[in-house]
Amino acid sequence: MATLEQFKGVLVDTLGFKEHQINTGEGDGIASTVEGLDDKAEFLVTTTVGNCYAAFNHDGGTLSEAEANRYKALSILMPNGPAAYCVVQTGENLRLFYVEKGNELHDSIEEWDNIRDAEDMVKELKADVVTSLEQWARKTLHTENSLSRFVQLMKGCWQDIWDIENKRNDWIFDEFTRFLFIKLNEDGKPNGAFTTAKFKSYCSENKHMGDKAGQNFINNLFDDLKIRHPEVFTDENERVLSKSETVKRVITRLEDINLKDTQGDVLGRAFEIMLSDTFKGKDLGQFFTPREIVSFMLDLARENPEASALDLDKGQRFLDACAGSGGFLIATYEDVYKHTLFNGIEPGKKEKLLKRLGQSTFFASEIEEKAARLGKLNMIIHAVDQQNANWIHQNYIYNEEYGGLKPKIEYEVDFGAGKQKQQIGPNSIDLILTNPPFGKSVKNNSILLDYTFGHDLKVFKTKSRPPEKRAKNSQDSEVLFIEHYLRVLKPGGKLLIVLPDGVLSNATAKPVRDFMRENALIKAVISLPSETFASTGTSIPTNVVYLQKKRPGDVQGDIFMARADYVGRRANGEPLKEDDLPFILEKFREWQSGTLRIPEEDNS
C-alpha cells in the first residue's frame, strides 16, 4: 500500500532526491508538451540531468493496458524530455513503469532507483531512442483522442443502412463490411472513387438507370475489390444490395477520412466497440473474446515479461484455429511488432523481419463466414503497412466444412512472386492462444474419423479382419480442438485455451484430462467468473488453461492455480474497476521465477 504523497517522502528520505527537485507546478500539476490535452502529472521529479520520475493519479482502483499506455505516453512528452520512470497511483497502490521498454516493475518502493541510478537511466536515453519514444507517445495519445470519433462514424453508417433498408442485423452486417472493404480499397488509390463528387457524376451521366445508377456505381467499385481480394470474396456473384440513397449517405459520411492513413488500432477498436453495441449474446460470441482475457492470456505466455510472447528471430509461428474476428492473432501481432521491430533495429534486418511477420508467422482459420470476413478485415486494418496487410490476411483460412479442425490444412498464397503453398500441419506451431466454441457438437464423419476422441475402434472376433474405425455420433468441439492443438504444436510449444469447467471436472471428461496429462505439461489453470462471457451468450464457469506440449524427458511439476472473482468487466460487457487478473499475473510470474511466497497455514 502506498500513495503519491508517501512516495514524495520516500524520494527525499530514502532515494536521495531534494524537495526542490519535486515539481508540482505550484499545486496545479505538470502539463505535457502536447497542446490541447488536459491531462497533467501530479508532479515531476527533475534534476539537472533530466526527468527521473513522472507521477500520475489514476481515478479508479484498476488500470487497463490502454490507460497505462496513456500515462507512459504522457511521461515521454513531459517538458525537458522523457521521464525515465512513470508512476501511477491506482487506489492505494503505486504502479511503476520503465518508460523506455514500457514494462512494469514490481520492486518495493524503497528499492526504486535512487537519484544516481535514475539519472544514469536518463543519460542512457539516446537521441534516436527519444525520437522513437516520442513518435509512439504521439500515436498513442492520438489513438485515444480519435477513438470516439470513429465509433460515432461507424455507428452513423450502420444507422444509415438500418434507416433506409430496414433489414435484420446480419443483413446490415454484410452490407456494412462490404462498404468498409470498398472504402479501404479506394483509399489505397491516389485518385480513389469513394467520393460524393464521383458518385453524383456517375449518377448524372447515367440518369436513364434511375435508382440503379447508384447501385451500379458502388458495385463497380466492389468488382474491383473482388478482383484484388478473391480470397476474401469467394463468390463472384456477390453484390452490394443497398439502395442508391443508402450508398450516397454512407459515402458522404466516410469520404472525409482516409482509412489507409488511420492508425489501425483506432479503426479496429472502434469496429469492435460498434459491433459490441450492435450484436448481443451468441451473435457477438462468434466474433470477440473480451479484450481483458486476450491481454491476460498473451501475458501468461511470455517467458520474459519484457519480451514478446513469440520469438520472431527464431521463426516461431502462431495459430488460432477458431479465430473469430482475430482478437488473439492481432494482439500477438502487435505485441511482436512492438517488442521486436519498433525501436533501434538495423533497416536491412527490419525489412527481413517485417516480411517474416507478414508472410510466415501468423495463421488462423474459422468455420463461420461472417466471423472469417471480419477477421480478415480486422487483420488488414491492424497491419503495420499496406504490404504487410496484403500478406497477413492470406493466412486466415475460411473453410465452411472443416473450419480449423482439418488435421493438415494446405492452401495457396501469393506474396507477389507467384502462387506458393502454405500448410498448417503436425508439429508446426509454437504458440496457440484460443477460445473455442463450447459444447458445439461436431457430427461430420470426415472430421470425427481423424481424431481419437471422434471415433471408436471396432475389434472383430475374426483375427484376419483388421480393426475398423467408426465415427461417433458427435463430439464436443472443444474436445476435438484440444486434441488438434496438441497435434499441431511443436514439442515445447504453448497452448493457452479457454475451457468450460466440465472438461476439468466432469467424470465423463476424464479421458480428455488423461490425454492432456499424457501429451502436455499443465503449467497453469485460472478459474474465471461465470459472467466473464455472459455478454456473448455463455454464462458457465470457464478456465484459462496453459499447456506446454511435452518434449522427451519432460516431467509434470507443480501447477499454478488461481481464481479470479473479477476480470474488469460486468456481465453486460461494460467496464468494471475491479480486476483480479493483473494480481494473478504478478503471482504467476513470481511462481515462474521461484520467488512466490505462500503463506503458512495457521494450525493453532
Image (tube, rainbow, N blue to C red):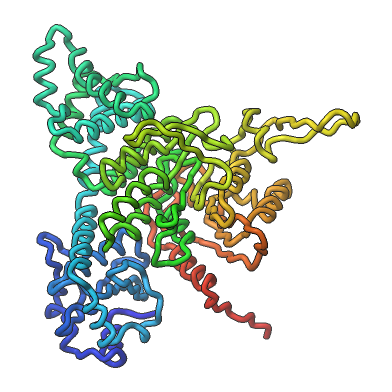
* Residue found 26% across the figure and 91% down from its top: 16
473 in relation to 577, above or below: above
Residue visible at 28% across and 85% down? Answer: 117
Q: Residue at x 41, y 45 (%)?
A: 360
**Extreme residue toward the top, this view:** 208
Q: Is 105 situated above or below 335?
A: below
Marker count (numbered) = 0
Give the residue displayed 68% in from the left and 83% down from the top.
Answer: 603
Location of residue 495 in the rendering, given as x and y in whole percent from the top left corner = 54, 53
Please indicate whether residue 104 sits to the left or right of residue 209 in the image: right
Q: Quadrant of the N terminus?
A: bottom left
Residue 203: name its quadrant: top left
Q: Is residue 343 shown left or right of residue 109?
A: left
- The spot of residue 461 in percent (x, y) is 90, 31
Q: Work out whether 62 lies above or below 111.
A: above
Residue 116: x and y in percent read 26, 87
Q: Which quadrant of the view contains residue 344?
A: bottom left
State whether residue 433 is above or below residue 425.
below
Q: Dividing the picture into quarters, in which one does residue 349 lie?
A: bottom left
The residue lying toward the viewer, choosing from 361 and 4, is 361
Residue 512 appears anywhere in the view: yes
Q: Quadrant of the C terminus?
A: bottom right
- Residue 273 placed where, x, y %? 32, 44
Please tell me which residue lies in front, 29 or 117: 117
In the foreground, 536 or 456: 456
Q: Is residue 46 left or right of residue 111?
A: left
Is residue 572 in sight in this rendering? no
